[in-house]
Image (cartoon, coloured by chain):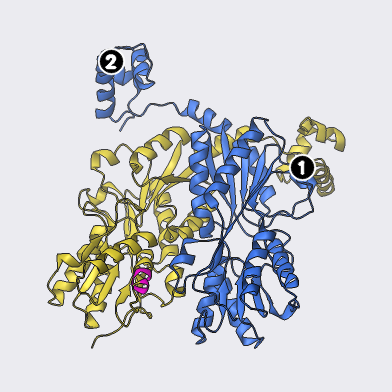
Chain colours: A yellow, B blue
């Protein structure tokens, strides 16, 4: 079928092309009845206004890319929704790009800049330990969202929104200590992680020290490199190894809820009870931490607020209102069934 | 900082612009040492080749859009990953577009066609009951992935990949009946659903009939309209109402694993045990159905295969190898801890 053009519509309606265009574009200078008649004809004939060129140009010049590491992580689901809504509200296009665990997100971003003429970038998740030299290769404003930054880069070289991973992790382990736990195992990130994983681990160590609990390296278990990180499967496999090690512990702190749920599964399969035999705590505040049996004690991150603030800062950068910004939100300790007091 | 141009790089290297271009584009007609020297200078100066125009054109003319209804549904996470990989392998751009529950996906697709000059579309999830007239407004090939179609549209009007929702649902309820359950409650879709929800519900009714079990409308509970569909929260709220109704039942079949987990939570909170007091079964085969406590009996969909086949059919359509295709994959009944025999 030949595609219908605006000229065909004008002919059918007995009006000029300009009038049809006015009807389509909600121009005020058109008779309301004429407009309704034209729109009816357009609808009946399935005419699609051919403004691709204009839209392409607009889309190409006003796109925000969200680069996400760990797209299967349910933690990001709600954030993506908020990003899209906020970006569309600003009349920008939203472009979601997945980054593989072993990909360098800055390299991906540089490629995207070339292809899409981006106006801004949000980096979501993943480790982030790029040098200043690397970061300066990015020519558009960017914000790191829920990515802990190590001291490698000066704070004035980038912008970020997250919780204070060190402090919130400290609070959770402090709570476990306050319940009388002294043998607290942890499932944490790889040794090389200098981002969120390191910060949460440092919080764990500080809380132990402040409670006079000796740090025991044999209670520190790292996620497996060959399994997707922060997943239930990773927590499950690591906890099986922890149990096989015969190392004694009364509580297990996993640095994500998904890891904690995998840990619970491994404990339950081994005939252990949670929290009677082992207390288990997570981090993030995923929905499933409430629905799991037992429900999981966790630090709930305010993901909606973090996502909104990320976009606010990004547009402040785009509009040159600010040069950089760092905002941390408090997380909330939610005590549930998976932890118990030894006192 | 002024952005470095290809002319600057050529000057620094003491070569012509064409030589720099050859180095960048891996042209065979360039001395290997010259090329290495140029690439080093490019790297040191953080030069970004400015081929936006070319890339834009290419990207604009070779894009596949995946329109997803229910982006927070973990069922789609792995599929999205496969879609992106397969589409990139074909050297096409991948564009992910979220569709709200109350949005018409065909309208969204028509808008996208205008803006992005799409080559093909994948519709993922959601209800799908559009008329032939509506579907013909789409001017590029499309495939419905994991969307059950009602009889409204002739099969030669579209292409689809999914499991046989009627049959697989039948098998699950047939299994529950074979365990001696006769009072089987179900959490199903809205009355208006003529897609997957209807098909799974029809499978439920047929299985009951084949076992000589009278259909009891009081055991049929619909997802809430004001809560995101197929979620844990929806299953949780509906099951609380089911319990409050005092209607007797021994098994509960939820048409998704997330609904089933919400149902378990409501039962556990009410002091009931699963499966001792109530058997619970889901559908989909999400990872969490294994990790939940108790683990959930479910019908596992082969999501990776479904996603791969979707892209294969889409490209067969684009290349005009076929006019339409329908492929159904078998699902797998996985019996776990959440169901028990009454016999």
Q: Residue at x 31, y 36 (%)?
A: A137
Q: Which chain's residue wears label 1? A: B
Residue B43: say if magenta.
no
Q: Which mark is residue B156?
A: 1
By secondary structure, the bulk of the magenta-drawn segment is best described as: helix
Q: Is residue B284 left or right of residue A123?
A: right
Residue A95 shows in the view? no
Q: Residue at x 36, y 11 (%)?
A: B29
- Sequence-first disc among 2 and 1: 2
Stretch in magenta: A265-269
Label annotation for residue A13: none
Identify the secondary structure beneath mark 2: helix
Q: Is residue A50 above or below residue B132?
A: above
Q: Position of residue B305 (x, y in %)?
A: 55, 47
Q: Is residue B155 above or below residue A172?
A: above
Quadrant (top left, top right, bottom left, bottom right) of the C terminus of chain B = bottom right
Question: Does residue B71 appear left or right of residue B313 in this picture?
Answer: left
Query: Is residue B186 shown to the viewer in this render?
Result: yes
Location of residue B118 in the rendering, given as x and y in whole percent from the top left corner: 61, 36
Tell me where residue B258 sits by quadrant.
bottom right
- Residue A240 x, y percent position in the rendering: 30, 65
The residue labelled by disc 2 is B32
Query: Whole-Å distance between the Cαs marked 2 and 1?
Result: 55 Å
């Amino acid at each position: 079928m030949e595609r219908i053009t605006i000229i065909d519509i004008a002919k059918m309606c007995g009006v000029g092309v300009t009038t049809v265009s006015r009807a389509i574009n909600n121009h005020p200078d058109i008779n309301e009845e004429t407009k309704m008649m034209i729109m009816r004809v357009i609808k009946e004939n399935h005419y699609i206004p051919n403004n691709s060129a204009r839209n392409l140009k607009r889309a190409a010049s006003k796109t925000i890319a969200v680069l996400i590491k760990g797209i299967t992580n349910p933690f990001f689901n709600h954030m993506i929704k908020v990003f899209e809504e906020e970006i569309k509200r600003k009349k920008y296009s939203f472009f979601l790009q997945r980054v593989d665990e072993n990909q360098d997100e800055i390299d991906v971003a540089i490629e995207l800049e070339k292809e899409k003429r981006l106006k801004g970038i949000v980096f979501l998740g993943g480790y982030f330990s790029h040098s200043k030299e690397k970061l300066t290769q990015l020519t558009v404003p960017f914000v790191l969202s829920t990515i802990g930054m190590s001291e490698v880069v000066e704070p004035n070289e980038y912008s970020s929104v997250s919780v204070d991973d060190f402090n919130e992790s400290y609070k959770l382990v402090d709570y476990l200590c306050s319940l009388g736990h002294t043998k607290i195992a942890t499932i944490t990130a790889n040794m090389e992680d200098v981002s969120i994983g390191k910060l949460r681990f440092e919080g764990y160590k500080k809380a132990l020290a402040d409670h006079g609990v000796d740090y025991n390296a044999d209670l520190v278990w790292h996620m497996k490199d060959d399994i997707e990180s922060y997943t239930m499967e990773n927590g499950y496999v690591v906890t099986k190894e922890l149990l096989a090690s015969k190392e004694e512990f009364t509580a297990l702190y996993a640095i994500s809820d998904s890891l904690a749920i995998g840990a619970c599964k491994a404990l339950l399969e081994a005939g252990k009870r949670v929290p009677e035999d082992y207390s288990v705590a997570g981090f993030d505040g995923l929905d499933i931490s409430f629905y799991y049996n037992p429900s999981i004690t966790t630090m709930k991150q305010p993901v909606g607020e973090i996502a909104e603030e990320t976009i606010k800062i990004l547009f402040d950068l785009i509009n040159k209102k600010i040069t950089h910004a760092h905002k941390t939100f408090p997380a909330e300790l939610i005590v549930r069934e998976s932890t118990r007091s030894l006192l």
